[in-house]
Image: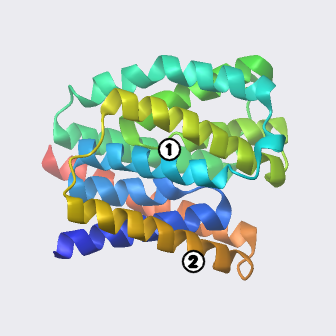
Amino acid sequence: MTGDLLLSAVVLVGSSVQWLTGMGFALVAVPALILLLGPTEGVVLANCAAGAICCVGLAGGWRHIRTTAMVPLCAAAACTVPTGTWLTRRLPESWLMLVMGSLVTVAVLLVLRGARATSLHGTKGAVVAGAVGGFMNSAAGVGGPPVTLYALNAGWPVREFVPNAMFYGVIVNAFSVASNGVPGLTATQWFLVCAAMGAGGVIGRRLASHIPEKRARLLVLLLALTGGTTAVGKGLWGL
């Protein structure tokens, strides 16, 4: 029972920050989910939950989607998702924890630094970001940072970044769920997860008017960094 309550708490926090900042469910939730459920189940639950949240969040933002960037981003992601799935099915659990924690940690540090690269411009940049994001999403449940870096290098304003990130989240998580499958949760766990997602959406929207966006995003990244390094530590401990 304690594990189920912790699971719903993780989903609640992840959902809240996703609605608060337009990003962050996977970054915040994945490290905790893989500690609670194991690498495979934690990732596939993150894929399902993040995809559902993005579907709801995208409802009012269709007019801001940049199809010239989203088509190569999503097409590249579709090509690399199976590679991430293949990797996770062949690595021992300790190595999976280490790899996933490292991917989250490195991705967060790059976003915190606001990394810029000439390779992340135009169609070529979209293909690179989408390919890396698709692999990371299916392998570690975290596909957003490469798209964030692409948007940063492209100079997208926040009002355009959020719906495009949501659209990418819908597509890449759909491919990841198709490749990885769905988590084997009990009926009670599914109920708690769905309830936590709904409650998190309400909380996140209410907090959005009280917490400055930059401060909220920094909090999300710091939480993700803590979770990522914890997963790395557990992976190293198990080797």
* Residue 119 image-quadrant placement: top right
Q: Position of residue 140 (x, y in %)?
A: 39, 40
Q: Residues within 10 Å of mark 2 (few under 14, many from 20)?
A: some
Question: In the structure shown, which secondary structural element does the residue marked by tag 2 occupy?
Answer: helix
Q: Amino acid at mark 2?
A: Ile
Query: Is residue 175 something that shows in the picture?
Result: yes
Q: Tell me if residue 159 comes above or below residue 135 in the rendering.
A: below
Q: How many marks?
A: 2
- Decide which of tag 1 and tag 2 comes sooner along the chain: 1
Query: Is residue 229 something that shows in the picture?
Result: no
**Residue under pointer 1:** 106
Q: Left or right: where does residue 10 sit relative to residue 115?
A: left
Q: Left or right: where does residue 37 sit relative to residue 151?
A: left
* Residue 4 image-quadrant placement: bottom left
Q: Left or right: where does residue 127 sit relative to residue 180?
A: right
The residue under the point 75% across, 75% down is: 212
The residue under the point 57% across, 41% down is: 169
**Residue under pointer 2:** 203
Q: Tell me if residue 210 comes above or below residue 152 in the rendering.
A: below
Q: Tell me if residue 69 comes above or below residue 106 in the rendering.
A: above
